[in-house]
Amino acid sequence: MKKITIFAVLIAALMFVSCGSKKAASGGAMVMQKSAEAPARVNMKMMSDSASFDEAVVEEAEYGAANGQNADTINRKLVYTGNVTVQVSDLDQTEKSVRDWAAKYGGYVASSSFSDRNYYTMVKIPSQNFQFAMDEVSSFGSVKNRSISTEDVTEQYFDVSTRLETRKILRDRLQKYLSDAKDMKDLLAVESELNNVQSDVEVMEGQFRRLSDRIDYATVHLTAVLPYNSTEQGFIYPDMGSKMRELWSDTVNFLADFVMFILYVIIYGIPILALVAFLYWLCFGRIGLLRRFFKFLSKKKQ
């Protein structure tokens, strides 16, 4: 009986040790998994300069961007641009119609210009209304040209956004360091780095704002033209008198250019030809200095 009891105790101990080892192994695996999944954290007290601090903050921000970007990439960031040319009969009325058309779709006229027979305008339209607005451009007149282009700026958008957030994190941490700094040397170094980071933040905010505006508002370049050889007052017959004057002016200009060419030939061409002829006569002609020199050399070799 005593032996059986001892044997049972040994078996129970072995089972306990086995279970404990399995729990420890599974617990260790869970710890390793959590440590692998957790982002690299920054120990602020261990950093002695701003360069190391900058690297750590960038690493932390990049980890967050990598984990949150999968959902964002589904929402593509697109920039739409439209180009339209229409033939109209009244430029002033077309300008009013364009302004009403832009306001109807929540947009605005960014710039415009007039000439005798043309009206050009650049209109900003909210991107969600861009296609509806483009479908209505035929109401202005006869459409001669119509094109739409799309630019995918998703990668650029998220790149600027990530770098901007990274610099903001660094700015906040540096501000905390600045308030905790006690040594004057460290205070000046942190303040200098903080100024640089703040400058980067302002530049990136401007880039991000401009890019966001391009995404939120599509651009439509619209050109309105009058029919050929006409103005808003009606058809204009060709002016034969002005055409003849232009022909006579072109003829006189051609003759003047021809005469100038002859003068250039006389002034510059003849002296150059004379100089070439003189050099030929001197070297290979009746005097023949080079000819005599080569002849002398050939005799000397013999």
Image (cartoon, rainbow, N blue to C red):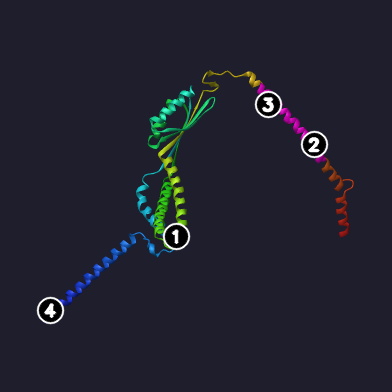
- Mark 2 vs mark 1: give the one in front: 1
Magenta highlight on residue 267: yes
Label 2 crowd (10 A; few <14 / some 14-19 / many >=20): few
Q: Secondary structure at mark 3?
A: helix
First in sequence: mark 1 vs mark 4: 4
> As rendered, which of 37 and 200 lies closer to the eye?
200
- Mark 3 vs mark 1: give the one in front: 1
- Mark 1 vs mark 4: give the one in front: 1
Which residue has dot 2 on it? 267
First in sequence: mark 3 vs mark 1: 1
Which residue has dot 1 on it? 187
**Mark 1 residue type:** Leu
Q: Which residues are magenta?
A: 245-273
Label 4 crowd (10 A; few <14 / some 14-19 / many >=20): few
**Mark 2 residue type:** Ile
- Mark 3 vs mark 4: give the one in front: 3
Residue drawn at 19 percent across, 72 percent down: 16
